[in-house]
Amino acid sequence: MPYGPHAADDRARMLETIGIDTVDALFEDIPEGLRAGPLHLDEPEPELLLTARLAALAGRNRVDLASFLGAGAYRHWTPAVVDQMLLRGEWYTAYTPYQPEVSQGTLQSIYEYQSLLAALTGLDVVSASHYDGGAATAEAALMACRATRRDRILVSRAVHPHYRQTLETYAEGAGLEVDELPLVAEGPLAGTTDLGALERLLAEPDRPVAGVVAAQPNVLGLLEAMPEIGSLAHLAGALFVAVIEPVSLAVLAPPGEYGADIAAGEGQPLGIPLGYGGPYLGILACTDPLIRQIAGRLVGMTADLDGTRAFVMTMRAREQDIRREKAASNICTNQALLALAASIYLSAIGPHGLRDVAATGAARATELEAALAAAGAPRLHAGPYLNELVVRVPGARAVHARLLDRGILAGIPTADLLPDEPSLSDGLLVCATEVTTSDEIARFAAALAAELDPVATGGAA
Amino acid sequence: MSVVGERLQPTIFELSRPGRGGGKIPHPPADALDRIPPGSRRTTPPALPELAEPEVTRHFVNLSQLNYSVDTGFYPLGSCTMKYNPKLNEWAARLPGFANLHPMAPDSVAQGTLALLWELEGMLAEISGMDAVTLQPAAGAQGELTGILMVRAYHRARGDTARDEVLVPDSSHGTNPATASMAGFRTITIPSAPDGGVDIDAFKAALGPRTAAIMITNPSTLGLFERRISELLDATHAAGALAYMDGANLNAILGRFRPGDAGFDVMHFNTHKTFSTPHGGGGPGAGPVGVRRVLEPYLPAPRVIREADGTFRLETSRERPMSIGRVRSFFGSTGVLVRAYAYIRAHGGTGLHEVSDDAVLAANYLRARLRGTYQVPFDRPCKHEFVASAADIKHRTGVRTLDIAKRLIDKGYHPPTIYFPLTVEEGMLIEPTETESLETLDAFAEAMIEIAHEAETDPGLVTSAPHVAPVRRLDEATAARQPNLRWRGMTGAQTPCPD
């Protein structure tokens, strides 16, 4: 066993103390008919060989492409200090801080995370973390239902489809109704949530709405009229759940300013690697009045017997290990180490740095928009966006596949992302961040031009 | 609340001074945000701290040193399995090919990760005796929800809609009843029998046409194998219900017992308990779920498919029409799964068998060493953990299990899990794991015995512990009554950006 600590006679001494001859005696309580035979797995692999195997597997992924993929997970530059700190065993080999006297590092770091995210979101209460943006959005909807004692959620179709699907899964278990808010199909507001439809759905007799869920920026990169959505929700007695992207909050109005009661979102852009989907960081925040409804752990400031400032998990009567079937959620393990990554990232990059990250992404996206338009793929929508946009590309799926052969990861075909939106059948959702280079943009534009008009550019048919 | 005393480490907000830091990325053009309408813009900068990198480093290093961890000492936290976290696995998850892969990358770009995930599904199926596995759930509790939602979908697909109850033993993890509630079921709590197992008569009496599933942790949270497991499972299936196994304690029975062979229909794995993925001070985890054939259609999408030509792809949702849907975004906690894969490969089938043997050996060794000093309510061979009780000590000396736990901190150990399961008076759940040396186990046993002696001779020393921890016991009541959940001392950054 590769990490076993025993010297030659240790096991024998332990068996002797127990008073048995073989370790098999400790398994005699497993009924005979149910005892397993040997596992059909490969032989143990020494570290030298395993290292080579893992490196070879990682090498089969192609991460050298010029990537314009976003859609809920974003390529960012992370200061080296973040991972150096995360590699300390005191952080990553500790458990949940059940014994606060020997867990002040983790506890204070969670308190700082809660504070940092409260500053970004403009909301009072931030949970210690959830699994990801999808599960956080689902928990936000459940919170809205508990708080209003209603059981119907309206969710914009411009909320990430994975989040909506997660919400539907959770809603099925909780017995909640989920109705989708359509998007405006054309005109200056195309691609954003249809406010007229929202008004109609909120006004349906005998179908009171617990919460309205909309994203800023939305999954198509567009800015939504969040204050108006919030006002309409509140007029109908519903809560307003804003799905947020944390880097954008350096430059966009925070949910606390435009009337959101709950914010949920994906914290991956705050110093967390793409890692094919996880582990990520679910952000969940709310206003003070909703504090007893929030799911997940909370850390508070207190003092020890000598009056020394200290931190502790608090308001635990909401949690599963105390309340069992009456808990606010079943969440136990969360994403503490990823919340720590976000805290280190925000501390290292600072308020000005975070603004620069967001604004540089916007500037790169402006450059990308112009280059792709010149290559024959103009923007599909007219409304304002931050750093992600949809461009019109006839036969987008096929073009996307051919661009891949040219070393360009051309975002994602909108027909794959939102297959039920006819207005999006010929689009590519593309994204730029501070790591996108002018050279990558130029290569993308040249390759796209060659695909769209092979004769004019002399490319292959 | 206000704190007047000392502080261990300033918060990052107290370390902030206007104008510090910066220089990490080039400034954008001044007009970068001009196209954002004023109504959508932020007017007050967020109140984030301004620090130079040396201070950031010291802050987080100093904070880290206030933590106890597996890398610094023995951590016998029962039910949590604080085994050694191999460093190779940290290296592997950070390989650029794994770490920089976008979750929506086309399959052709992601062949290395997809191959690993597909192999891992197969390994977990072999280890558990299940027919199919999803890797999507983000943690054990989400695995439970996934499993119980599949049970719900199964009954509904058969038109069996009257089943609205889930049976859960009183010794179970709190996540089990909380999960049942989230999935729309009523929890029926089954008492334990005097031998620590499920009370079979009470169980059979509760079982009926309204039972959707039972949720059993095996070995139980008392560290005991459920000896009458076949009887439980047969009765469950005879009643038309399904059997869920909470796999939190799978680390005790690798290569000894396969839940799928025994008749469990669905189970989750806790990768941080069985497969050594680090727990990170609370997370992340991963909670793969294995099912028998009857539940396979309901698994969350997407799973990884291996094509005839040996390439891999994610299935589409159209290929899984009966699925319960997604439980989170993207594929899952892939970085955690890479670590679990490396752990299984490093051990192979024989090594995993040894993992359980050594974990069970260590627990029984400690049980034998402590038996004369503490009560051991269920004094038969345990699996990977056992419950000791300080009830006698408390009645005699007034020293409680909580005090003993705090005194262990003084002696350099992380305390065991205390007051869980709820069914044992003054209980402490001790789980040494397979990666601790005999010297460590002996030293811990001696510390425990010493504390029992102190309880008799100098109880005040124990009840006022810890004495050498970074802080003394905390005022938890005030923290809950007057919650202070965030730093309020800072306003937004007022200074211009430093250059």
Image (cartoon, coloured by chain):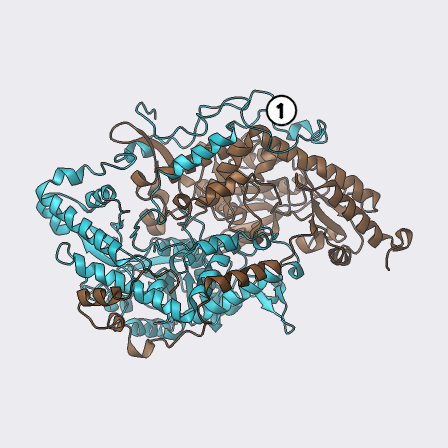
Mark 1, other Cα within 10 Å: few <14 / some 14–19 / many ≥20: few
Question: Which residue sits furthest right?
Answer: A456
Left or right position of A244 against A450: left
Q: Is residue A213 in sight in this rendering? A: yes
The residue closer to the viewer here, B355 or B482, is B355
The residue closer to the viewer here, B261 or B415, is B415
Chain B pictured colour: cyan
Vertically, is A315 above or below B314? above
Left or right position of B4 against A137: left
Q: Is residue B383 in sight in this rendering? A: no
User: Picture coordinates of residue A246 (x, y %)?
Assistant: 56, 38
Vertically, is A119 above or below B348? above
Question: Which residue sits furthest top?
Answer: B495
User: Picture coordinates of residue B200 (x, y %)?
Assistant: 25, 68
Question: Which residue is located at x 61 percent, y 45 percent?
Answer: A74
* Residue A235 occupies quadrant: top right
Left or right position of B148 against B404: right
Q: Which chain has been coloured brown in this picture?
A: A
* Residue occupied by mark 1: B499
Query: Considering the image in quadrants, where does the C terminus of chain B appear?
Result: top right
Question: Which residue sits furthest bottom?
Answer: A33
Vertically, is B49 above or below A32? above
User: Picture coordinates of residue B173 (x, y %)?
Assistant: 33, 55
* Residue B117 occupies quadrant: bottom right
Q: Amino acid at mark 1?
A: Asp
Q: Secondary structure under badge 1?
A: loop
Question: Which residue is located at x 64 percent, y 29 percent?
Answer: B41
Q: Chain of mark 1?
A: B
Left or right position of B395 against A302: left
Query: Considering the image in quadrants, where does the N terminus of chain B appear?
Result: top left
Q: How many marks?
A: 1
